[in-house]
Image (cartoon, grey):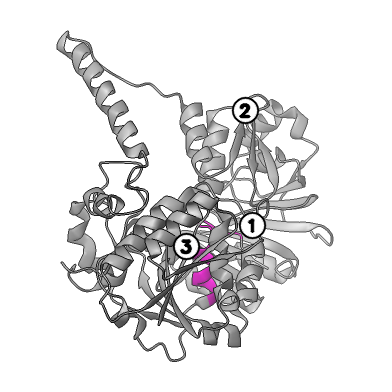
Amino acid sequence: MIPVVFICDENYAMPTAVAITSLIMNKKKTTEYDIIVISNQLSAESENKLKKAGNGALRILKQYDNYEGLFKHSYVSPVALYKFEISNILSEYDKVIYLDSDVIINSDLTKLYEIELKECYAGVVKDFYSHLTEHDNLRLGRKVYFNSGVMLLNLKKMREYDIPKKLFEEKRVNLCNKYMDQDVLNIILGDKVKLISPVYNFMLRNKEDLEKFYEVYGEEPSQNNVIVHITPIKPWQDKECLFFRLWYKYYKKSPYKNTKLPAFRNARIKLRQNIINSFFKFFGYKISRIVSEVNKYKFLIEQKGYVVNSLNNTVFIPIANITLNYADAADLKEIYEIFIQEKFGLALGGFDWTVVDIGNSCISAFYFAKRPEVAKVLVCYCNDIDTFASGIKQNSGLYKKIELYEEFPNISEGKLIYKISDNTKSMFPVEKLSEQGLLNKADIIIIEWQGFSFEIIKSILLKYGYKLFYKYNDTYSGIITAVK
């Protein structure tokens, strides 16, 4: 018996049923699956259709922790965090195959299940686009960054080392949660994972990227992929998805075959718009779409699950439980770059933070001073006094929060953030912090480095017990966020 686990809520019941349909249709006659769907809430209709797709081999396990309000993401439901608890939920098994709902299984999974994991927590596949374009491995300071959509899980080993508890603890304190579950799984499982063939988690957005496949995996793409992971574009939403025809084949065999797909409605809307545009172009009109900078960044921020309130000009960031004020597009752009793109991996919580701003090139003192949870901003050896003075004049309401120091201040109280702009000339900022004993007192240190100082800075911070997050701009520059 091979246990195969899915997690879904009502919104993902249909694609889960399609994935299960492909699983059943392509298994060997001798293979027996125990298909388990973990969910917190499903309608009776969805439950019946899922069981029908499973052809008698499916059972639904209801869980009642939905994590709403605790963890939020722009497009991933908090029920994805049940991944953290699989080893406890399925205590009768020592090993299971976990699959996301947006997959198609092209052949039998027996060989996948028989992979020996030994001391590893999981068998996983490198995340293609994280390594190719997003560089999430560098962001987390890891050699390998894997995709959590397909995993062969060693539940026995995970229970032995209390991995579920460690996953939730990390999720609660981690400042760089770009994804609902994937970052945390990469951090906690660490190097104790076994890399398996990409045929078990084949990810491709377009055919052009096939040329870059070898760059990530060190092997050529296969024509016989066991599991196709259709991400990030979903075939039930967009007919132009690369794997739409493959997915649609099993959709028409699934219990949802008579359900209307958003993909067709979206295609009709796009076709109608193209016809209208063609009509105007025929008569010599030039079609252009103008999007203001404010709306552009508002859209980008909201895509990631942050709440932009245009009435009072605020952005609410759930993961940090803070609200930021913005005045114009420049402010929204800065919020987007710092928090959404995670340029610095920074998320504050609580109040009465003291920010020590060393150098001008990372984040402006005024940006910090606008934030209600920041009590004081201490600016050290400002490089451009004229600009600083002009800023104070234009932001007179903030002058009480901002103080200018020529040397490092002695600070004994409050939560501290140090922002350091380092360069190739000296290690003065880090050395000065160390000399004054401030490294022990800082909760967060953000260091922009250049040249060959990375390893020195890294060793100093590790010596003081900081957890490090990296952002590389290129080989000789980048940013380190150190969290106590």
Circle nearer the N terminus (1, 2):
1
Residue denoted by label 3: 139
Q: Is residue 470 visible?
A: yes
Circle nearer the N terminus (1, 3):
1
Residue at x 61%, y 59% (from the top left corner):
175
| Rendering quarter of residue 167 | bottom right
Say if mark 2 contacts mark 3, CB within 8 Å: no
Residue 120 location in percent, x, y? 45, 86
Q: Is residue 179 above or below residue 403?
A: below
Say which of 257 and 172 sits in front.
257
Q: Does residue 357 belong to the magenta stretch? A: no
Q: CA distance from mark 2 to mark 3?
A: 30 Å
Residue at x 53%, y 60% (from the top left corner):
80
Q: What stretch of residues is rendered in magenta?
A: 175-188
Question: At label 1, which amino acid type do we have?
Answer: Asn
Residue 234 location in percent, x, y? 35, 48
Residue denoted by label 2: 327
| Rendering quarter of residue 334 | top right
Q: Secondary structure at mark 1?
A: loop
Residue denoted by label 1: 66
Question: At label 3, which amino acid type do we have?
Answer: Arg
Q: CA distance from mark 1 to mark 3?
A: 28 Å
Residue at x 47%, y 38% (from the top left corner):
300
